[in-house]
C-alpha cells in the first residue's frame, strides 16, 4: 500500500496547480486569444499561392544504357557527370540534371526571357526566383517534374514552361558545344556544306523557259506533210522545264539535311537528350497551405505557453 502522507501531499500540490491556473485564468485566456487572433490574421492575409508543373524526360545515352545492363559495373547513370565543364562519354546523370536545373545560367535566362520583376519593380534576382522553384524526381525513372510557385496562376505557368524550355536549350548547348569528337567535326562540316548549297540555290530559278519553231517539232512536221498547214512554220512553241541545276541543288540539300539530322540523332543517342513531355498548364486552384492546421497548432501552443507563463508569474511574485 502507498504512503498516505505522500498521497496527501500530491493532492495538495495538484490543488495548488489548479488554484494557480484559476487565479491566472484571465492572463492565460488573454494570451491564448491574442496569439490565436494573430495566427488567424496571418493565415488568411497571406496571399494564395499557385503551383504549375512541367515535366521533362531524360533520354539516357546508348553507352549509359549498355553499361547499366552489365553486372558488376557501377551505375554510371547515377554518378556525377560534369567535371571541369566537360561532359563524360556516357552522358549526364539524373542527379546532375536536377542540380543543373538550378544553375545560375538557366535561372538567369528564365528571368531575362520573362522580364521578371519583384514587388519593388526591380529585376527579380536569381535567389528570389530559386525560392519559387522546386525540382522533384517523378515516379518514372527518367522523368523530372519542375514546379513553379507564384501568386499569379498564369505567371506560375509561364515560369514553369520557360524554365523547362531554357533548360532543354542549355542541355543541348552543353552536349553539342562542350564535347569534341569525330561526330562534332563531321556535323559542322555537313552544316557548313548545307548552308553553302542553300546560298547557291537562292541564285537559281526553279524553272527554265524553252522556245523552238513548230517546224522543228516532230509532231508538227508530220502534220505539215499530211495537211499542208500554211503559215504554221512561222509559229513557235514554248515550254517550261525544271532547271537541272536547281533540281540538282535541291536534291543535294535534301540529302544534306538527312545527313545532318542523322548525325544529330547519333549524338543524342550517344550522350542522351532532354525533352519536354508535359508542359505546365494554368493551375485552377491554389495549393493547400494548411491554414486550419496552422491556426489549431497556434492555439494549442499558445494555451500551453500561457499556462507556463502563468505559473512563472505566480512563482516570481511569491519570491
Image: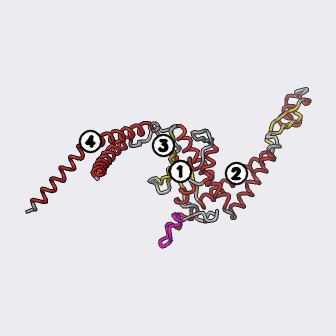
Q: Secondary structure at mark 3?
A: strand
Q: Residue under circle 1?
A: 56
Q: Which mark is residue 51?
A: 3
Quote the CA–CA distance across marks 3 and 2: 41 Å
Indicate whether residue 77 is drawn in magenta: yes
Q: Which mark is residue 257?
A: 2
* Mark 3 vs 4, N-terminal side: 4
Q: In the picture shown, does residue 313 fall above or below 4? A: above
In the image shown, does 149 or 87 lie closer to the viewer? Answer: 149
Residue placed at 31% from the left, 46% from the top?
306
Give the residues in magenta: 68-79
* Mark 1 vs 2, N-terminal side: 1
* Mark 1 vs 3, N-terminal side: 3
Query: Disc 3, disc 2: CB below 8 Å?
Result: no
Q: Nearer the viewer, mark 2 or mark 4?
A: 4
Quote the CA–CA distance across marks 3 and 4: 44 Å
In the image shown, does 226 or 207 lie closer to the viewer? Answer: 207
Quote the CA–CA distance across marks 2 and 4: 84 Å
Q: Which mark is residue 25?
A: 4
The spot of residue 286 in percent (x, y) is 44, 39
Query: Disc 1, disc 2: CB below 8 Å?
Result: no
How was the colour assigned to the protein in this rendering? Answer: secondary structure
Within-10-Å neighbours for mark 3: few <14, some 14–19, many 20+: many
Q: Secondary structure at mark 1?
A: strand
Amino acid at each position: 500500500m502507498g504512503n498516505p502522507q505522500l498521497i496527501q501531499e500530491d493532492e495538495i500540490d495538484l490543488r495548488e496547480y489548479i488554484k494557480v491556473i484559476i487565479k491566472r485564468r484571465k492572463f492565460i485566456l488573454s494570451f491564448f486569444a491574442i496569439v490565436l487572433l494573430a495566427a488567424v490574421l496571418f493565415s488568411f492575409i497571406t496571399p494564395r499561392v499557385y503551383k504549375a508543373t512541367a515535366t521533362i524526360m531524360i533520354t539516357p545515352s546508348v553507352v549509359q544504357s549498355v553499361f547499366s545492363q552489365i553486372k558488376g559495373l557501377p551505375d554510371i547513370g547515377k554518378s556525377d557527370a560534369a567535371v571541369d565543364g566537360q561532359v563524360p562519354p556516357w552522358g549526364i546523370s539524373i542527379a546532375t540534371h536536377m542540380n543543373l536545373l538550378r544553375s545560375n545560367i538557366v535561372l538567369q535566362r528564365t528571368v531575362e526571357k520573362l522580364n521578371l520583376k519583384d514587388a519593388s519593380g526591380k529585376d527579380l534576382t536569381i535567389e528570389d526566383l530559386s525560392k519559387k522553384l522546386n525540382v522533384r524526381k517523378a515516379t518514372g525513372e527518367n522523368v523530372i517534374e519542375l514546379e513553379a510557385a507564384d501568386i499569379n496562376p498564369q505567371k506560375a505557368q509561364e515560369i514553369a514552361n520557360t524554365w523547362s524550355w531554357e533548360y532543354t536549350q542549355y542541355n543541348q548547348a552543353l552536349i553539342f558545344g562542350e564535347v569534341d569528337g569525330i561526330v562534332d567535326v563531321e556535323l559542322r562540316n555537313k552544316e557548313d556544306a548545307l548552308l553553302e548549297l542553300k546560298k547557291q540555290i537562292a541564285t537559281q530559278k526553279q524553272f527554265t523557259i524553252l522556245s523552238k519553231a513548230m517546224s522543228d517539232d516532230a509532231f508538227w512536221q508530220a502534220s505539215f506533210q499530211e495537211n499542208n498547214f500554211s503559215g504554221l512554220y512561222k509559229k513557235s512553241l514554248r515550254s517550261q522545264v525544271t532547271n537541272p541545276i536547281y533540281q540538282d541543288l535541291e536534291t543535294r540539300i535534301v540529302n544534306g539535311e538527312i545527313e545532318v539530322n542523322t548525325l544529330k540523332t547519333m549524338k543524342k543517342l550517344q550522350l542522351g537528350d532532354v525533352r519536354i513531355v508535359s508542359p505546365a498548364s494554368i493551375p485552377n486552384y491554389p495549393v493547400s497551405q494548411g491554414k486550419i492546421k496552422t491556426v489549431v497548432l497556434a492555439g494549442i501552443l499558445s494555451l500551453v505557453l500561457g499556462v507556463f507563463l502563468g505559473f512563472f508569474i505566480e512563482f516570481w511574485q511569491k519570491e
